[in-house]
Image: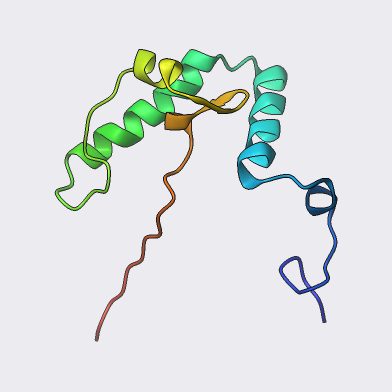
Amino acid sequence: MGGPLAPGFEDLEDSLGLTYGALYALRARRYMETYGLTSEQLAKIAVTNRKNGYYNDKSAHGELISIQDVLNSRMISDPLHLYDCNPNTDGAAAASL
């Protein structure tokens, strides 16, 4: 039984060669057009997330940034800037009983 991650599974995004960044940019653009979200409001999410990381000693990105920092960062896939995107890292948690 195949699923979206099974070898040979074909979906529209894959057939068009979309990267995750491009796919999320399309979704962000659609959300912005549907609900009137501005680039500044979108940037505020990145600012808040970095601020939360600032208070975690083990955070990969512990610096504070501003909305202007986000908007002035490199464009990855319109409307997403570098600081709008997740860093290329993995996270994990475990509990030993």
Placement of 3 over or under 77, stated as above or below: below
Percent across and percent down for residue 78 are 63, 24
Percent across and percent down for residue 24 are 63, 38
- The foreground one among 76 and 26 is 76
- The foreground one among 79 and 49 is 79
Image quadrant for the N terminus? bottom right
| Residue drawn at point x = 22 percent, y = 39 percent | 62
Placement of 66 over or under 49, stated as above or below: above
Determine the residue located farthest toward the bottom in the rendered image: 97
Left or right of residue 19: residue 15: right
| Residue drawn at point x = 23 percent, y = 28 percent | 64
Q: Which of the 4 quarters of the picture holds residue 32?
A: top right
Left or right of residue 37: residue 49: left
Q: How is the image coloured?
A: rainbow
Q: Which of the 4 quarters of the picture holds residue 21?
A: top right
Image quadrant for the C terminus? bottom left
* Numbered marks: total: 0
| Residue drawn at point x = 42 percent, y = 45 percent | 87
Placement of 4 over or under 53, stated as above or below: below
